[in-house]
Image (spheres, helix red, strand yellow):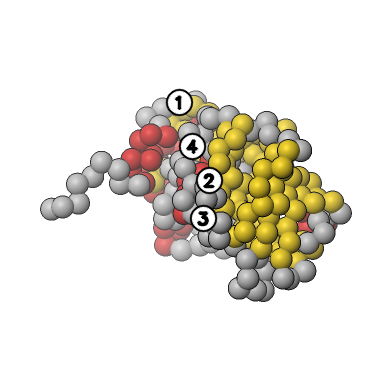
């Protein structure tokens, strides 16, 4: 088995997690590579025994992400359309995607190495702009959401929105989020959007602080083509693809649709989306005592 390991930051939780992981892989004599920049942060007595990578190919069987959900979003840019399953170890905070806790690493990794896990396939969004933008072309997809928002101003922007070439509305707001089911528990949720099950064939449009108070989050089929055109007092606005940000001019037409590939998330057999929701959002807990 060939395994890749990726992380963004290094702190005490990361240190203990990477030690546990690498010790397991050394014992089992597995082929392991660390992302090159992350490897420079890692401290381990046998670090020289491991390879590094800057890009992935389809020879890898797993990618292990060490961090929070943001780290997994970055890891997706390495996996792209290679269909490499991603394992998320949570050394961050909330963790809807990174569900393996640091205390459970040994048991969880052994289960995964023994093929005792399930795969959750996650929809992504793809984006095209006219005129084209070089920054976006390099990684023209997002797992959580694509969002447009105002730049260098306190004034609202107008987001003219078409669905399958039919005019929907013009949102007067700080911005607009187009979210996948995976991203429904992220930025969209914080702006009042609904929670959507990861296996639903849906997307959600969630306005950010809309001025037209009748504007509400809208759930649409994931085969819908979404076209946006932004206007405002400034000549430019921001567009984000998960954590990656670019600047676009107001004459840009943005087209968003479901990406032609999916990301494969590894889930333990004991895990479920409902269980994760209940734990992360503290649903059903009585806080009166």
Residue at label 2?
A: 217
In the rendering, which numbered label is found on residue 116? 1
Residue at label 4?
A: 196
The span from disc 2 to disc 3 (Cα, nearest Å) is 11 Å
Q: Position of residue 189 (x, y in %)?
A: 47, 49
The span from disc 2 to disc 1 (Cα, nearest Å) is 38 Å
Residue at label 3?
A: 213
Observer-nearest residue: 140 or 167?
167
Disc 2 vs disc 3: Cβ atoms closer than 8 Å?
no
Q: Earlier in the sequence, mark 2 or mark 1?
A: 1
Which marked residue is nearer to the observer: mark 3 or mark 1? Answer: 3
Q: Position of residue 185 (x, y in %)?
A: 47, 46
Q: Earlier in the sequence, mark 1 or mark 4?
A: 1
Image quadrant holding the N terminus, namely: top right
In the rendering, which numbered label is found on residue 87? none
Q: Earlier in the sequence, mark 2 or mark 4?
A: 4
Please, what secondary structure does the residue beneath circle 4 have?
loop
Q: Earlier in the sequence, mark 3 or mark 1?
A: 1
């Amino acid at each position: 088995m060939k395994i890749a390991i990726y992380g963004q930051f290094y702190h005490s939780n990361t240190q203990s997690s990477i030690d546990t992981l690498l010790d397991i892989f050394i014992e089992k004599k597995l082929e392991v590579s660390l992302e090159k920049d992350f490897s420079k942060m890692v401290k381990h007595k046998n670090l020289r025994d491991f390879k590094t990578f800057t890009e992935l190919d389809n020879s890898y069987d797993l990618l292990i992400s060490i961090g929070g959900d943001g780290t997994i979003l970055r890891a997706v840019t390495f996996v792209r359309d290679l269909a490499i399953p991603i394992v998320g170890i949570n050394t961050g905070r909330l963790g809807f995607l990174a569900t393996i806790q640091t205390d459970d690493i040994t048991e969880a990794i052994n289960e995964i190495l023994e093929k005792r896990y399930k795969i959750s396939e996650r929809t992504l969004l793809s984006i095209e702009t006219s005129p084209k933008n070089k920054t976006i072309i390099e990684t023209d997809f997002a797992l959580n959401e694509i969002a447009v928002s105002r730049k260098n101003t306190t004034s609202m922007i107008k987001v003219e929105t078409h669905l399958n070439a039919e005019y929907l509305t013009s949102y007067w707001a700080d911005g607009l989020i187009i979210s996948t089911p995976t991203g429904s528990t992220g930025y969209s949720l914080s702006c009042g959007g609904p929670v959507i099950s990861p296996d639903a064939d849906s997307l959600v449009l969630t306005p950010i602080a809309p001025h037209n108070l009748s504007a509400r989050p809208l759930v649409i089929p994931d085969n819908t083509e979404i076209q946006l055109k932004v206007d405002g007092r400034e000549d430019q606005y921001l567009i984000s693809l998960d954590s990656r940000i670019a600047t676009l001019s107001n004459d840009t037409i943005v087209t968003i649709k479901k990406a032609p590939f999916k990301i494969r998330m590894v889930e333990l057999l004991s895990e479920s989306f409902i269980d994760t929701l209940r734990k992360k959002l503290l649903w059903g807990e009585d806080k009166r005592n």
